[in-house]
Image (spheres, coloured by chain):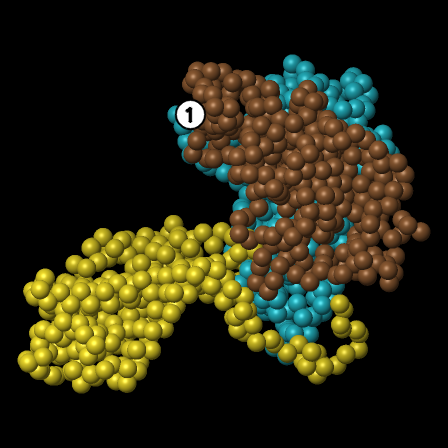
Chain colours: A brown, B cyan, C yellow
Amino acid sequence: METKENILLNIKNLHVWYRVYGGYLKVLNGVNLIVRKGERVGLVGEAGCGKTTTMKSILQILPPGDFLIPKGEIYYKGKDILKMSFSEIQRLRSKEIAMIFQDPTTALNPVFTIGTQIGDVIKYSIALEEKKVHKEKLKILSARALKEAYLPDPERMLVNYPFQLSGGMRQRTCIAMAISSSRNLLIADEPGTSLDVTIQDQILHLLKEIVEKMGASIILITHSLGVAREMTDRIYVMYAGTIVETALTKDLFQNPVHPYTKGLLASVPKLSGGGIARGIPGRIPDYLNPPQGCRFQSRCEHATSSCAENPPQFVEVEKGHLVACYLAQR
Amino acid sequence: MTQPGNNEILKAVNLKKYFRIGKNKKGPIFVRAVDGVNFSIKYGETLGLVGESGSGKSTIAYTVVGMYHPTSGQILFKDQNIGMEAVRRSLSLKKEIQIVFQDPSSSLNPEQTVEQILSLPLRIHTRTSKRQFREKMVELLEKVELPSDYLYKLPPSIGGGEKQMVAIARALASNPSLIVLDEPTSALDVSIQAKVINKLMNLQKELNLTYLFITHDLSLERNVASRIAIMYLGKICEVADAATFFEKPLHPYTQMLISSVPVITEEEEKLKPKKIVSIGEIGSPVNPPSGCSFHPRCPYRMPICSEVDPEMIEVSPGHIVRCHLFSMPEKTGSKEV
Amino acid sequence: MRNLSGGQSNSSIAVSLARPKSLFWTNLGRNWYKFSRNPLSIIGLVIVLVIIISAVFAPWIAPYPEQAGPFVDFENAGQPPSLQHLCGTDNMGRDIFSRIIFAFRGALIMAIVVLALAVPPGVLLGLIAGYFQGGWIDTVIMRITDIFLAVPPLILALAVASVLEPNLMNAMIAVTVMWWPWYTRLLYGTASSIKNEYFVIAAELTGAGKFHIIFREILPNCLSPIFTKIALDVGWVILIGASLSFVGLGQQPPTPALGQMVSDGARYMPIFWWMTIFPALAIVLILLGFNLMGDGIRDMLERGMG
C-alpha cells in the first residue's frame, strides 16, 4: 500500500442527505475518493449523480440548514474537514483548496473590477496570517496572478469589469484567482463547458500547465469522457451518489468493467463514425426512496438478486483498478 | 407533396442577415451574423451545420424557420420563396417546417401540461376532431416512446431527455417535411443524448424527414449528418460529406476545430489532424477582420488573406472550400492533410 | 413503462387516461411545506385567520355587539382597559374591542371589492401592453398608467372620494381607481420578458393566434407574482381605506371604521390613550398578518427546482 503522507484528500464513505418535502434526498450513498499529491483526478458522471454535492462537501459550502451528513469523513492531510472549526475551514479555503466554478460569467461579481476581486482574494489570504498588505503591493500581486493565467496586458486588465471580457478571459480570471496564493488542491467544476471548443481547449491546457508548475493536485469534474481522458491520471466514475469504478485513466478506457462505465463509453459518439449506441435504458433512481442494494440495478442487464440486497463493495480487478459491482466478483 | 425537378428541399442563395445595433460617426453598426451563405439540403438527408459562437449557425436556423427575415439573399423551400417572418407565412408553410430548440426547459411552457402543449399544433394544422385528439396525442407520445400518462405532467416534473422528446413530439405533430434541430442534445447527458439521437434517426427514416442539424459537437455531427458545413463569423468555410469532412479536412479552421475535439479512443486520436493550437480569441461579427475573416488566427496565412475574401471552390465533387490555399490552381495539393 | 400496445379500443383509452385532480390540491402537501419553511409565515396565516373569523362571526365573538352600532352610555365613557372592556371604552361609552372586531368587516369587504375590481383590468392592460411592447398600444396604455402612478396615491384617492358622497362604496371606488395601475405595471414587466421565452416563440412559429399567446402562454406564467401581490395588497388597501376614514371619508358613523376610530380618539391623547392606540394597533396587526402571510405565499408559489 502507499504511504499515508502521499495522500492529500481522502473521502471515506461519505453520505450526504438533503432535507426536502417528504423526507430526505439521500444523494450521496458512500463516496470513496482519494487524491494523492500531484495527482490529476477526474470525477466523471452525469447530471444528478452527486459530483457537485461531493465537491461542495469538501469546501463545506452546502446550503446551510438543509442538509445532513449522517456518515462519513473527509480527511485532508490527515484531519477530518467535517470536524474542523470555522477558522480552520477558512484557512483551508484560503490557502489549501481552491474551486474553479463552471460558469465564469456568474462566478465573477459584475459590479466590481477584476482588480478588486482578485485583490480581495489575495488580501484575505494574507490577512489570515495577521499581515496587512499595501495597496501598491496588492496591485503587483494581482497583476502577477493574472499573468500566470496568460491574460494579455495584466495591469490594464485590473481596471476592467467582467462584462468587458470574453468568456475565455473570464475563465482565466477565475483560474488566476484560484492560484493566487499557493494551493495544494484545485477543484475545477466542468471547466470550459460553457465556452467554445477551441477556447475550452486553451483553458484545459492552461490548467494542465499550471498544475504541473505548481506541483498541485487537481480534481477535474466533468461529464465529458474525452476531456477526462486527455487531462487526468486517474478517473472516478460516479453514478447516483456512489463511485462505481476507479482506475488509472488508460486502464479505464482499455478495460472498463462496470456496466455503467461500459454503457457510458458506448454512448459517446465517435469521431470515426459508426453510429451511436442505444444509450442506457431507464433513469436515475429516486433519491427520496432509493433502492436497497446497488443503485444501478434497475438499468443493468446483468442484475441478479444479490444486487438488490446490499450495495456492492469495491473489488480490485487489476492493480489500482477498483469496481463496485457483483459482476466483478465472479 | 410533389418533388420539383431538382431534389433540393431547401436552398439558400447568398443569404445575409445583419442586425443593427447602433451607429457611430461612420454610419450604422451591424452585427454581420450571416454574411453571404449558400447551401442546399436534399430531400431526406441531414445537413450538419457546425461552428463556434458568432458563426451564425443559429441565425441561419432561425431565419429558415421564420424568426427572422433575411437582410438580403434568398431562401427557397420546395422552390418557394420563404424569406419572410413566420407571421407572414402561409399556414401550410408553417406546418411543413418545424424547429426543436436547444433547451427544453425554456422551449416548453412550464405552466402547460404535455396535453396542452401537443394540442396546439394538432388544433392548428390537422383536422383532428375533439374525440380523436387524445388518441392522436397518445400516438405522438408513442412515437417518442413516452407513456401516455405523461399527457398530464408539467414540464418541470419531467427529466431533460424526456422533455426534449416532448419537444420532438410537438414538432412531429403537424407532419412536417423539414425539421430544424438547434443543438437538440447539448443540454443533455451523454447517455440520454444517445437515446434521443437514436430516436431522431429512426424517426427520420420512418417518416421521410429532412433535418438541418446544428451543433458544436463535432463527434456528434459525424454520426448524424450526411453532409457537413462549417461556419466561421457568418460565412461557410467548408462543405463536404461526413466521412470526407473528417478524413480529409482542407480548411485550416476545420483542421483546428477537429484537432481540439477530446476523444476517447486511440483510433480516433489517429484520425485527428495534427494539433493546431488556436491562437487568440474568436473574432467579432461586428467588426470582422478584412479579407478572409479567419486570417488573424490562421497558421497558414499569406499576404493575400488579409486583403481578399476567398471564393468558394469545389475541390472535388461535393467538397467545397473557401480558402486561398486552394483558390490558386498551382497551389492545389500542397497543403493537404 | 409502456402501457399501450396496438389494438386497444377507444373506450379503454378513455378509461386509462382519466384526468388527475387539479394539481394544486395534489401538491397541497408540498405547497404547505414550502409555505411553512419560515415560521413567520405561519404566524401571519394565524393572524389573518383570526381576523377573518372574527370579522365573519363578529356578532357572536364580540362581547358587546350592540355597541358597534348606534349606542351611547355616557356613564361608562372613557373607561380604561379592564376585564369587562378589553380595550376600554370610547368617548361615547362604547366597547372599543367590539367595535374593532366589527370594523374588521368593513376593512375586509373593502379589500375584497377593491382588488376584485382593480386586478382584472390592471392585469389585462398590462398583458396587452407587454405583449405589444414597442408599438402604439404599449405607449398609450403605459403613459396613461404613468399618469395615474404619478399622482401620489393618497391624494388621488382623497380627490376622488371628496368629489363623491362620503360612504363605503365611494371610498372603494376611489381606492380602486388608484390601485389598478400597479398591476398594469407588474404585468407589463412580466409579460414583456416572458414573451421572449422560447416556448412563446415556438407557439408563434406554429401559427398560434394572439389571444392564445397572451392568455394561454403568457398569463399562466404570470400568476405567481399576481397572487403574491394580491395577498400583500390586502393589508395595504385596508391601510389606505383607514387613511380615508381617518379624514371622514369612507364608512360613516355609527358604523365603526378603524381610521375613524383612530381619528376620534386622537384628540383625547395622551390621557385616554386606549381610544387611539388600540385601533391603531389593530391596523398594524392587519398589515403585519397579511405581509407575513404574503411572504409565505411568495415562497410557496416561487418556481424552485422542478
Q: Nearer the viewer, residue C190 or A84?
A: A84
Tell me the quarter of the picture where residue C94 sits.
bottom left
Residue found at the very far front of the displayed protein: C83
Mark 1 residue element: loop
The vertical placement of B280 against C1, above or below, is above
Q: How many marks?
A: 1
What percent of the width, then of the height, locates residue C166?
13, 73
Identified at 74% across, 40% down, the residue is A33
What percent of the width, then of the height, locates residue A234?
78, 34
Identified at 57% across, 46% down, the residue is A62
Looking at the image, residue A307 sits to the left or right of residue A153; the answer is right
| Quadrant location, the C terminus of chain B | top right
Three-letter code, disc 1: Lys
| Quadrant location, the N terminus of chain B | bottom right
Residue A111 visible? The answer is yes
Identified at 53% across, 35% down, the residue is A87
Identified at 57% across, 18% down, the residue is A147
What percent of the width, then of the height, locates residue B334?
81, 18
What percent of the width, then of the height, locates residue C86?
21, 74
Residue B53 visible? The answer is no
For label 1, count other residues whose C-alpha is less than 10 Å away and answer few (under 14), some (14-19) or many (20+).
few
Residue found at the very far right of the displayed protein: A330
Q: Nearer the viewer, residue C297 or C250?
A: C297
Q: Which of the chains bears the disc numbered 1?
A: B
Q: Which residue is mark 1?
A: B26
Tell me the quarter of the picture where residue C87 sits.
bottom left
Looking at the image, residue A316 sits to the left or right of residue B199; the answer is right
Residue found at the very far top of the displayed protein: B303
